[in-house]
Image (cartoon, rainbow, N blue to C red):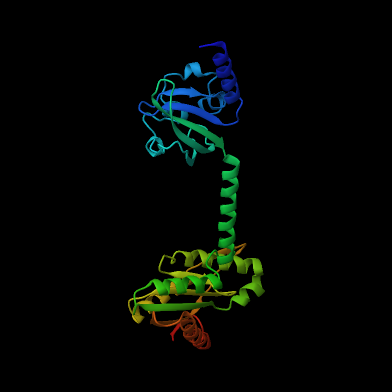
Amino acid sequence: MNSLTVSTSKDLENILNHLDAVVYVSDIATYELLYMNQYAIANIAGEADFTRIKGKRCYQVLQKNQSGPCSFCTNGKLPDNGDSYVWEFKNTRNNRWYQCHDRLITWHDNRLVRLEVAADITERKEAEEALQHAQEQLKWLADTDGLTHLYNRRAFYKNAEKLRLSLPTNTLLGLVLLDIDYFKKVNDTYGHEAGDKVLEAIGFTLKTFTSETTIVARTGGEEFAIFLPIKSKKNAKAFAQQIRGAIGKIRVPYYKDVLSCTASAGMSTGYTSIQISSLMRDADRALYRAKASGRDSLCEG
């Protein structure tokens, strides 16, 4: 090797060692690590130089607690036309995110090797994750009643309609509207803080009835709605009474007092061909009758 070649080689190595990116080469067949720049040695391998790494397999150095080839290894995915294979992953050794450009090349001894150049994109990924979390939070806030953590009125209609359309034709549906009896008296006697605690307790109780096929929401101040497929009107009536019973058992300690409540309910039923708004009107009329007849009761629409 002449002096020019040596000088060029040293210059190239110097350039690679000053890149703020991971650069390494490994044997395609044996996974032997043949080269790693100083950035990768320091930031991933945690070593001072390549001498303590030389001869090891890439998965032993680059990943944590890895005794064999990685399940996400790109060796079998590299194009044979010289193009790069671009991918992203979170390194298990330092928990940093990288965008990797892997390429199949021929080493100086004619064996095939994988050249990887990987840029740290952790800040970008964290920003993306923060944005996704913020979007999820906004969606949650848009669909959720902040006090009871049940669906709000808008989300109730949206999800009830989605459920209705997903069910087989001629599935029987039930809709129950609940109104907490004399709730204004709680606020007037104990204050709105006490009323909020009662509503929170009701929300916690009603949450236990929620499922993929049971939509529960707070649709107004002290009004709640439940929508679900049912086997029969008798089954729906039993379910509505079960919910009223659960609300009647709620006890909310408030300073020296213990608050409780009852609920009036209106129920309507119909098949999947009926509109949610129509079920709501029928249940609302039934609820009015339950309240007019003395409250703490259930009427059918």
Q: Residue at x 62, y 77 (%)?
A: 184
Residue 242 makes an appearance in the image: no
- Residue 84 vs residue 92, the one in the foreground: 84
Locate residue 274 relative to residue 133 in the image: left or right. Answer: left
- Residue 221 vs residue 49, the one in the foreground: 49
- Residue 163 vs residue 200, the one in the foreground: 163
Which quadrant of the view contains residue 196?
bottom right
Which quadrant of the view contains residue 162?
bottom left
Q: Position of residue 230 (x, y in %)?
A: 36, 75
Q: Position of residue 217 (x, y in %)?
A: 51, 70
For the C terminus, the image quarter is: bottom left
Q: Is residue 8 above or below residue 232?
A: above
Q: How many marks?
A: 0
Q: Position of residue 107 (x, y in %)?
A: 43, 24
Q: Residue at x 48, y 23 (%)?
A: 35
Residue 195 makes an appearance in the image: yes
Q: Residue furthest top?
A: 2
Q: Position of residue 58 (x, y in %)?
A: 43, 27
Q: Is residue 34 above or below residue 289?
A: above
Q: Is residue 38 above or below residue 248?
A: above
Q: Residue at x 42, y 71 (%)?
A: 163
